[in-house]
Image (tube, rainbow, N blue to C red):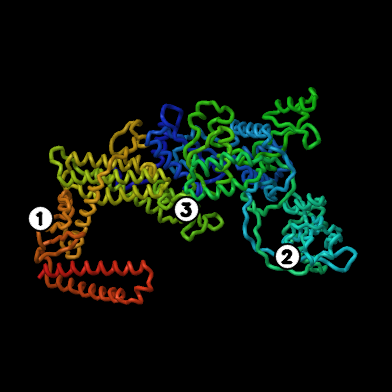
Amino acid sequence: MIPAQFDAKSVEQKWYNYWMKNNYFHSKPDQRTPYTIVIPPPNVTGVLHMGHMLNNTIQDVLIRRARLKGFNACWVPGTDHASIATEAKVVAKLKSEGINKADLTREEFLKHAYDWTDKYGGTILEQLKQLGCSCDWDRTKFTMDPDMSASVIRSFVDLYNKGMIYRGYRMVNWDPEAKTTLSDEEVIFEERQGKLFYIKYQIENSNDYLVVATTRPETIFGDTAICINPNDERHFNLKGKKAIIPISGRVIPIIEDEYVDLEFGTGCLKVTPAHDVNDKVLGDKHNLEIIDIFNEDATLNSFGLHYEGKDRFVVRTEIEAELTSINALSKVEPYTNNVGTSERTKCVIEPRLSDQWFLKMDELVKPAIHAVLESDEIKLYPSRFNNTYRHWLENIRDWNISRQLWWGQQIPAYYYGDGKEDFVVAENIEDAVKLAQERTSNPNLQASDLKQDADALDTWFSSWLWPMSVFGGIMDPENEEFKYYYPTNDLVTGPDILFFWVARMIIAGYEYADAKPFKNVYLTGLVRDNQGRKMSKSLGNSPEPLGLIEKFGADGVRVGLLLSASAGNDILFDEELCNQGKAFANKIWNAFKLIKGWEVSETIAQPESSKVAIEWYEAKFQQVLAEIEDNFDKYRLSEALMGIYKLVWDDFCSWFLEMIKPGYQQPIDKVTFEKAIEMLENNLKLLHPFMPFLTEEIWQHIAERTPEQALIIAEYPKVKEVNTELIAQFELATEVISGIRTIRKDKNIPFKDVIELKVVNNEKATTYFDSIIMKLGNIVDLMYVSEKVDGALSYRVKSNEYFIPVTGNVDIEAEIAKLTEELNYTKGFLRSVQGKLSNEKFVSGAPEQVIANERKKEADALAKIATLEQSIAGLK
């Protein structure tokens, strides 16, 4: 029994369980060609949002299509430990329970972190199942799995031994909220409105003062010099002198360097080597003292005097008032500047000097530049992102890979002495002891004498190995799975992590496997609301994804997302798109019900109209299939879906089914019925990657199927030669039918009333579709004549003239009056257009496109006048 309505809720879990039970998602190496996708691992404690919905729907479309096309499809799921975000959540949870992280050992904290991920981790993967994602769940990986961590540690040791990883004392990006360093790529610059403070520094042994402009008055406690340009005539009197820092009273030298911009501010630059990267360069050059005034949470330390323990932004406000009170503030101006913020915590970054681990990038990037920009070995879609990729890689700096966190892979450096160089790097403590014994020539050195570096590695240093490590390619590069599945085929991700992840995976792929990690990178756009705003919880404009699935069904949501999701372009999301997807599902369901509701006769002959309809639809199907394949090749998934949408909605439902539909309470012939089922099944194969639940439900209703005959593993249609002439001829036939229907509607001629159609075939059009025209127009007699027919209603299609003899239902006088009124209006419109075109001033001054539009209006009006005059003459 076929349900009257398609109920997405009742079928989604049923078919997902069926697919899981029959192991359709699982892949293992065999003789087939592999097609591999690795999921961009979402944060382990994350939940599904609209960006995930789009990204994973696209991946599922690609993997399901590959499966249908006979590839050994393998989609590897997994999650990322997201060190900064997850540690912050665990610390907040502990704080709510009255536990301070600082009071715990690393092991105790990690137990809490694993408890947290066990409780919340994997939620997002379960949610992806509701979307229909056909991942190989047996292969689910977590970046902190023992084998994944081992891969990361081996990579670190290998790069260190190659001289590519080093420890250095550098100015780094410090996140005061997460209390860790960040790489340059994790700093997002935002334009913010602030103030420019002009602060007076008294000249030592003088009543005179110099003025320094700064946006950060709180950093005066870290000043160790004032710098002037030696060529600045305004400040020749300052050479060789010293200045006194207001409030602190500390005396600092006035130095000279051409680095100072003569045009900016006052020409005097305060130098704070501990808190500005450029000041650090100046400090090194001039051998200046370095004074760090901040604690790790960006509160001031003891160098901040009575501001000790206060937040930097609180101090900024208070120090403005104090400088004013002691007459040390010359003026304050509004000032807009770019402020670096943490990509994770959104906190304002603080430049900070620190010992950190760095990876040299200058040589590593060369194969990655060649692969994308020179050889096309890896293609980005859309290709405009090549320029962004080039800019980053050609301006890359060494990567700061250490983080002051506990959640993550602990850096495998083991210290055996007090000096900065008293360490060894090894994969485990046993190897570290041996190396330390050799280094110190002390065979009695034990594991208890070594102390492992407390820092963890950057999460991205873990995930840049993802396409290799999920197949064991780092620990055992000769294993069967790695050699079979790597390199992968397609990567689907957002352009916001083109640097963080995509480029780094390419770098790692060539370093460790001497091969690209994937062939194609499909970069999705951002999902925005219909006002163009980025979706976010704070704006309250992001719908709850599972709520959308509940309301519109997974298939409806998938179609709604993809209809407007062209590669690299942002999506203006509106729930109406999902409603459109749901309506499409209902349209397909009703078409299926219509076909299955026909009584089938094995004795009646196949009508000519049905034979012609089948031949046409087979040609149309092949034409659209070729277009779909071309769009997939170019990663135009939205266009591919739209092609299928139009094929099914317009060509199959609106035309094909009407052409073959039997008369009221009449049976359909068996040949036509079986062909209709075949056409429906082919449609379902094209639709399945986009609408998996609906299509499997219909497929299984059509006939009893064994697990080996399920739609998910059916054979995708093959592209064949297209009869384009037949398709073009049908387009003419549809216009003829539309003309008949228009006349029936306008003249109130019921469809049940048969009419005649007489044709002056000036176009020499084929008569092949006459049986279709007769059936869909309810024509009792279609005749070809040599001249116009008097006393008939008429219309034109191209140069062909079509005449419908008047029946008793038509009031001839009223019809002539109506046509005459329309003729007079059209003649008036023509005079207006021709008046413009005869105006030399208008023609010479108007844009070329405007003139072309007016000439088209003239031609259309002339053609319409001819048709109306002919129709009137025919009725008289």
Dot 2: what SS?
loop
Image disc number at residue 569: 3
- In screen coordinates, is 239 left or right of 842? right
Q: Are marks 1 and 2 in contact (CB under 8 Å)?
A: no
Which of the pair 187/859 is nearer the observer?
Answer: 859
Quarter of the image that includes the C terminus? bottom left
> How far apart in space, not on screen, are marks 1 and 2 (Cα)?
91 Å
Is 769 situated above or below 63? Answer: below
Can residue 549 be seen at all in this image of the molecule? yes
- Amino acid type at mark 1: Met
- Amino acid type at mark 3: Asn
Dot 1: what SS?
strand
Percent across and percent down for residue 256 are: 80, 58
Percent across and percent down for residue 662 are: 18, 47
Which residue is identified by label 2? 265
Q: What residue is shown at x 46% (from left), y 56% (from top)?
A: 572
Percent across and percent down for residue 504 are: 58, 41
